Image (cartoon, rainbow, N blue to C red):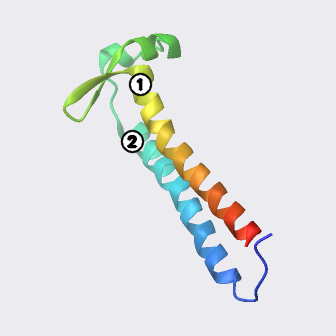
Amino acid sequence: MFDRQNDTELPLAIVNLFLLMAVMLPYLLRRTWRNHQRLPPSLTTNSGFRKWTNESAQAWQSRLKGSDAAIDMLLSLASVAFGLLALGIVFNLS
């Protein structure tokens, strides 16, 4: 799909490494945090996703509804995915 010239291997390898880092860094940070985090007494029981979305979550210096916090997080990932899709379409059309 992207191979119209002979010098496309290096940019594709760099993009693949960026995508790998964008996925692996949050995963590794989450695993490290989970293994070394002591849970407060209120979080020792599994309360469920529905309850979490209805409660408020603290983000920096404000409080957000849990569902809004999840949407904010997923919106940035979706924008990167759509941007890369658009980039692929532009490369395919040119």
Q: Secondary structure at mark 1?
A: helix
Upstream in sequence: badge 2 or badge 1: 2
The dot on residue 89 is none
Quarter holding the N terminus?
bottom right
Q: Type of residue at label 2?
A: Trp
Q: Quadrant of residue 69?
A: top left
Residue wearing tag 2: 33
Q: Type of residue at label 1?
A: Asp
Indicate whether 25 appears above or below 17: above
x and y, in percent, of residue 86 in the image: 64, 57
Q: Residues within 10 Å of mark 1 (few under 14, many from 20)?
A: some
Indicate whether 32 appears above or below 15: above
Quarter holding the C terminus?
bottom right
57 on left or right of 3: left
39 on left or right of 61: right
Indicate whether 23 appears above or below 1: above
x and y, in percent, of residue 67 in the image: 45, 21
Q: Residue at x 30, y 21 (%)?
A: 40
90 on left or right of 4: left
47 on left or right of 42: right
The residues tagged by marks 2 and 1 sit, at their Cα atoms, a distance apart of 23 Å
Q: Farthest left residue?
A: 61
x and y, in percent, of residue 50 in the image: 51, 12
Q: Secondary structure at mark 2?
A: helix
Q: Residue at x 33, y 30 (%)?
A: 38
Q: Residue at x 53, y 47 (%)?
A: 79
Q: Residue at x 37, y 18 (%)?
A: 43
Q: Farthest front residue?
A: 94
Indicate whether 92 appears above or below 70: below
Residue wearing tag 1: 68
x and y, in percent, of residue 63 in the image: 26, 23
